[in-house]
């Protein structure tokens, strides 16, 4: 699975002894916005001029995690800036490989499956260990957190009651008359439509590509789609009374939050980011996302509060 990486740019850090590995992200990651996603002013991050640049995908949880990582690094005396909202996995992994970013928040199962389409582990520990074996040369994952965010198939309460839906397999009978809303890459990824067809035998009548977050949630709420692929930590689920269908065959696997870094930055960032992973839980992540997504608070401020509360700032 190894592939070559571009030469590592000079840095004021000690090079890691092991040339381990990297790549990939959560199935739900959306396509980036306009402009050059790798330019220093992309997204809502800083100018990318720090010693360590923390990137993110273009959904709110990834952006929040990037600010948490950067804040933890700053607290340890590491000059860190953010470059958020880069885009989908295919785009932001290229940025990591080419060296315009050094650190990314990632998810164990999605990252493993991205690098090995036959990856089948679902146990959290086995998924994490297996991930290390399939990462490309030049990058490495640090300690995983207990926090987990999985893809989920979601319907409104009205649809669940009308069609007697409790689990993903319950969609099989009526999916041909339903429209699925999800990010564009869900159409081709192993844990997306191909996985639903292979694992559950489900084929939807129509597919509508939508950016994760408000666009997908609004389309489901307004009846423009019948089923949505939504992050399991999205506060819109409890806020709107959406029903998450049970993934009884574990198509979406284990998805623990984990820092993905270039190996030339590993020694510099490991202590600070392992400290974040030790404190981060699913519940804390959900609470923070309620503040950013529902209350519309600045993710950098929410990240700062988390670091202070956990003694990491």
Image (spheres, helix red, strand yellow):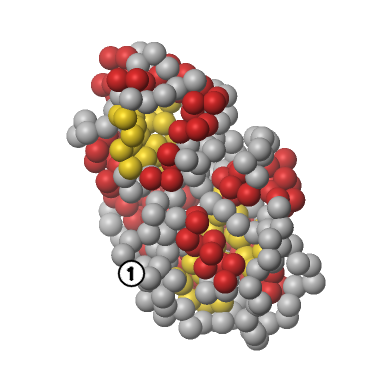
Q: Position of residue 131 (x, y in %)?
A: 69, 48
Instruction: Report the front residue among 295 and 103.
Output: 103
> Is 35 situated left or right of 128 in this image?
left
Q: Position of residue 221 (x, y in %)?
A: 24, 34
> Is 129 situated left or right of 48 in this image?
right
Q: Quadrant of residue 143?
A: bottom right
Q: How many marks?
A: 1
What residue does disc 1 label?
Answer: 35
Instruction: Report the front residue among 199 and 244.
Output: 199
Vertical placement of 42 versus 11: above or below? above
> Is 54 situated left or right of 43 in this image?
right
Mark 1 crowd level (few <14, some 14–19, many ≥20, 10 Å Cα): few
- Residue situated furthest left in the rendering: 222
Which residue is pictured at 74% across the width and 51% down the height? 133
> Is 312 situated left or right of 221 in this image?
right
Which residue is pictured at 44% across the width and 71% down the height? 38
Vertical placement of 311 versus 160: above or below? below
Which residue is pictured at 53% across the width and 71% down the height? 101
């Amino acid at each position: 699975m190894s592939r070559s990486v571009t030469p590592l740019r000079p840095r004021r850090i000690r090079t890691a002894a092991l040339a381990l590995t990297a790549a990939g992200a959560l199935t739900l990651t959306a396509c980036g916005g306009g402009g050059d996603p790798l330019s220093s002013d992309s997204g809502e991050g800083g100018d990318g001029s720090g010693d360590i640049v923390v990137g993110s995908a273009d959904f709110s949880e990834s952006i929040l995690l990037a600010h948490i990582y950067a804040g933890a690094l700053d607290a340890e005396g590491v000059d860190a800036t953010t470059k958020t909202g880069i885009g989908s996995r295919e785009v932001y992994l290229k940025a990591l490989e080419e060296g315009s970013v050094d650190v990314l928040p990632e998810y164990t199962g999605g990252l493993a499956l991205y690098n090995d389409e036959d990856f089948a582990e679902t146990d959290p520990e086995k998924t994490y260990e297996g991930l290390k074996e399939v990462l490309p040369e030049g990058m490495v994952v640090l300690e995983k957190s207990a926090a987990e965010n999985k893809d989920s198939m979601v319907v409104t309460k009205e649809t669940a009651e009308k069609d007697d839906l409790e689990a993903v397999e319950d969609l099989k009978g009526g999916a041909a008359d339903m429209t699925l809303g999800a990010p564009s890459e869900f159409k081709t990824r192993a844990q997306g439509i191909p996985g639903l067809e292979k694992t559950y035998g489900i084929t939807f009548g129509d597919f509508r590509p939508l950016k994760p977050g408000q666009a997908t949630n609004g389309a489901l709420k307004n009846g423009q789609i019948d089923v949505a692929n939504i992050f399991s930590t999205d506060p819109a689920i409890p806020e709107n009374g959406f029903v998450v269908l049970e993934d009884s065959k574990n198509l979406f696997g284990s998805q623990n939050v984990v820092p993905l870094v270039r190996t030339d930055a590993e020694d510099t960032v490991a202590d600070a980011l392992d400290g974040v992973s030790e404190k981060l839980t699913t519940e804390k992540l959900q609470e923070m996302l309620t503040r950013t997504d529902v209350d519309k608070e600045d993710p950098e401020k929410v990240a700062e509060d988390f670091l202070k509360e956990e003694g990491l700032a």
